[in-house]
Image (cartoon, grey):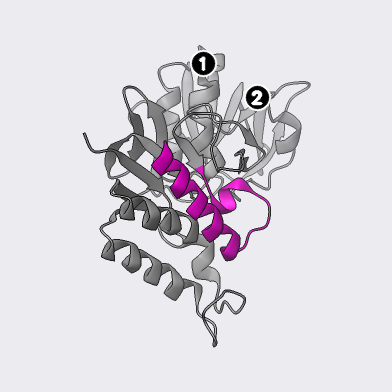
């Protein structure tokens, strides 16, 4: 029976991994959601092979085409969940994909809100993973901070446990459909508040919402956000890997900015290669 790998992320790390797994005869799917940080680079002049430099957007698009030319399949979607049954199950806005192995190459998550006391209550009412911590808030009122598909997924995960779930958009418009049974509040948030644990969020107009838990789900899920959903060890916003790019969960690997450290294309390509080799061996 043929084996397959799902690579989350279509940047330099993900595509480098895909080139190796596909050429080794492994059915390879890359789930990509745009160039993210790479496309913001107007001109890259410190990467090998481009005497006059290259834009991040051009490098990204060229990488995707190169992968397709060796048989890599791609899908444009946002990854919102990762779990394991008989196989790894990658949940996206375009459906679910099963895999024998997964490589997380999404880049780094930089979606920490600029709200007073966020750091104070991390681990004491504020969480970045509904799958990990939702059970601790069973029967309690909770909220999800975010306005897109990722936030709606997290809210849906919490709904069976919580007494109530409210999506807080912090002044943004909803960019995804609100699931049934979930409330929404679009007010700008000033602060998280409580004594030793989170008790409420205070809005800029000084109104407050009493909650026991606040789950951060801004933008799209970064590498660490996805990793936490299946029990992968993380350190801050970074996925913890060994020298072979393997995580603590057999069959899950990570590469590039998702692993922290130097955030450079050359490092992402190198780690992508290593993660591809490791997935092949696995």
Residue 143 to residue 33: above or below = above
Q: Quadrant of residue 79?
A: top left
Foreground label between 2 and 1 = 1
**Residue at the (65%, 27%) spot, across then down:** 200
What residue does disc 1 label?
135
Look at the image and say whether residue 9 sits in the magenta stretch: no
Toward the bottom, the furthest residue is 52
In the rendered image, the quadrant that contains the N terminus is: top left
Q: Quadrant of residue 120?
A: top right
**Rendered position, 197 above or below 260:** above
Is residue 278 found left or right of 95 in the rendered image? right
Q: Position of residue 195 (x, y in %)?
A: 78, 22
Residue 217 lies left or right of residue 21; in this view the side is right
Residue 259 at x, y percent in the picture: 60, 46
Q: Quadrant of the C terminus?
A: top left
Residue placed at 43% from the left, 75% from the top? 58
Residue in view at x 49 percent, y 40 percent: 253
Disc 1 packing (10 Å; few <14; some 14–19; many ≥20): some
| Dominant secondary structure (helix, strand or loop) of the stretch shown in magenta | helix
Disc 2: which residue: 125
Q: Residue 215 in the image: x percent, y percent?
A: 56, 32
Tell me if 227 is positioned left or right of 67 in this view.
right
Number of numbered discs visible in the structure rendering:
2
Q: Residue at x 58, y 64 (%)?
A: 266
- CA distance for labels 2 and 1: 12 Å
Element on which disc 2 rests = loop
On the question of residue 169 being in view, the answer is no
First to last magenta residue range:
254-282
Q: 17 or 97, which is in the foreground?
A: 17
Position of 84 relative to 190 (above/below): above
Residue at the left extreme, as displayed: 1
Of 41 and 45, which appears nearest the observer? 45
């Amino acid at each position: 029976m043929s084996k397959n790998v799902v690579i989350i992320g279509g940047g330099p790390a993900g595509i480098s991994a895909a080139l190796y797994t596909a050429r080794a005869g492994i059915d390879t799917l890359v789930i990509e959601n745009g160039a993210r940080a790479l496309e913001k680079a107007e001109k890259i002049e410190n990467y090998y092979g481009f005497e006059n430099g290259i834009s991040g957007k051009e490098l990204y698009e060229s990488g995707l085409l190169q992968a397709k030319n060796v048989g890599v399949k791609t899908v444009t979607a946002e990854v919102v969940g990762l779990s394991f049954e008989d196989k790894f199950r990658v949940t996206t806005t375009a459906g679910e994909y099963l895999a024998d192995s997964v490589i997380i190459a999404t880049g780094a998550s930089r979606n920490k809100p600029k709200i007073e006391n966020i750091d104070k209550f991390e681990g004491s009412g504020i969480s970045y993973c509904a799958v990990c911590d939702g059970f601790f808030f069973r029967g309690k009122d909770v909220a999800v901070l975010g306005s897109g598909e990722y936030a709606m997924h997290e809210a849906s995960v919490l709904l069976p446990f919580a007494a109530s779930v409210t999506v807080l958009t912090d002044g943004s418009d909803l960019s995804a459909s609100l699931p049934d049974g979930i409330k929404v509040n679009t007010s700008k948030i000033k602060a998280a508040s409580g004594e030793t644990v989170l008790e409420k969020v205070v809005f800029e107009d000084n109104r407050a919402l009493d909650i026991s838990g606040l789950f951060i789900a801004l933008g799209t899920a970064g590498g660490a956000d996805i990793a936490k959903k299946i029990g992968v060890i993380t350190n801050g916003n970074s996925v913890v890997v060994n020298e072979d790019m393997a995580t603590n969960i057999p069959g899950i690997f990570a590469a590039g900015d998702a692993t922290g450290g130097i955030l450079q294309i050359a490092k992402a390509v190198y780690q992508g290669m290593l993660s591809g080799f490791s997935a092949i061996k696995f």
